[in-house]
Every structure is written in C-alpha cells, then in structure tokens.
Amino acid sequence: MGSFLAVMALAALFGGMLFFGAVMTPLVFSKLPPDVAGPFIRAAFPRYYLFITVTSALAAIGLLIRGNPWYALLAVIVTGITLWLWLEWMPHLNAVRDAGNQVDFQRGHRLSVWVNLVQFVIVFALLAGLAG
C-alpha cells in the first residue's frame, strides 16, 4: 500500500510541476495579453501550491509506510517549502508587485523559480530512487 501511494503521489507531483512550468505558464504568457496573463497566473498559484502540498504530503505518508524515512523526510521538506512559498513568500511578492517595485519583484520571483526548480529536482530524485 505504501509503495503504491508513494509512487502515485510522486508521479502526480512530478507531472503536475512539469505541466505547470513547461506548458501552462508559457502558454498563458504567450497567448494572453499581459494585463490578463499576470492576474490569471497569480490566481493559479494558490491552487498549484495546494496541489504540491497535498501530493508531497501523501508521498511522505506512502514513503513512511513503505519504510523509507529519509525519502519521506525529503517529501516533507518539499511540503514545508511549498507552505512557506504559498503562505509567506507569495503574499510578500504580491505586495511588492502591487507597490510597483519591479526590481524587488523580479529578484523575489527569480528566487521562487529557483526554489521551485530545487523542489522539482528533489521530486525527480525520489521518483527515480523508487524506480531503481
């Protein structure tokens, strides 16, 4: 049961993160006018972070049941980082952007992209570790 839950949650997590970053975001910004694309993505991020939180937490539970406490710890770290991004960093970035501070917004946005990339690599490594 733990193996199934871990693999399914990690596969969904990996696929969801890949889809959002490689398909949805570029599509939104290439097909919608900037005054629509920005608010649309801004509205999508809470759902994206909720998805990551739920799937990484389910993966952690599956990994614990499976007997992989170190893998489970990595999944919990992904969950915790996502909660920070969602509940602390995203509101901060929104306030900075709303205040018109583009320099700080771009810097903060770059940080969030790098953090998300690290999370993506962790998820990939966990999934590859289970496949190996």
Image (tube, rainbow, N blue to C red):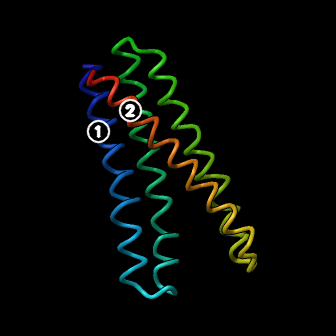
Secondary structure of the residue carrying numbered label 1: helix
**C-alpha span from label 2 to label 1:** 11 Å
Which image quadrant is residue 33 in? bottom left
* Amino acid at the residue labelled 2: Leu
Residue type for callout 1: Ala
Estimate how packed mark 2 is, as few (under 14), some (14 to 19) or many (20 or more) residues with alpha carbons within 10 Å: many
Name the N-terminal-most of marks 2 and 1.
Answer: 1
Q: Which residue is found at the position 39% from the left and 75% from the top?
A: 28
Q: Vertically, is 87 above or below 12?
A: below
Residue 66's disc is: none
The image position of residue 88, as x and y in percent, is 67, 52
Q: Residue at x 44, y 22 (%)?
A: 71
- Residue 49 position, x and y percent, is 48, 52
Quarter occupied by the C terminus: top left
Q: Nearer the viewer, residue 5 or 117?
A: 117
Residue 70 coordinates in the image, percent (x, y):
48, 17
Residue placed under numbered mark 2 in the picture: 58
Label 2 close to label 1 by CB (< 8 Å):
no
For mark 2, give the secondary structure. helix
- Would residue 19 appear left or right of 94 to someone viewing this image? left
Residue visible at 74% across and 67% down in the picture: 104
Seen in the picture, residue 122 relative to 49 is either above or below; the reply is: above
Assign the N terminus to one quadrant of the image. top left
Residue 13, percent from left and from top:
36, 43
Q: Disc number at residue 11? A: 1
Is 119 left or right of 84, judged from the image as shown?
left
Q: Give the vertical position of 41 relative to 83 (above or below).
A: below
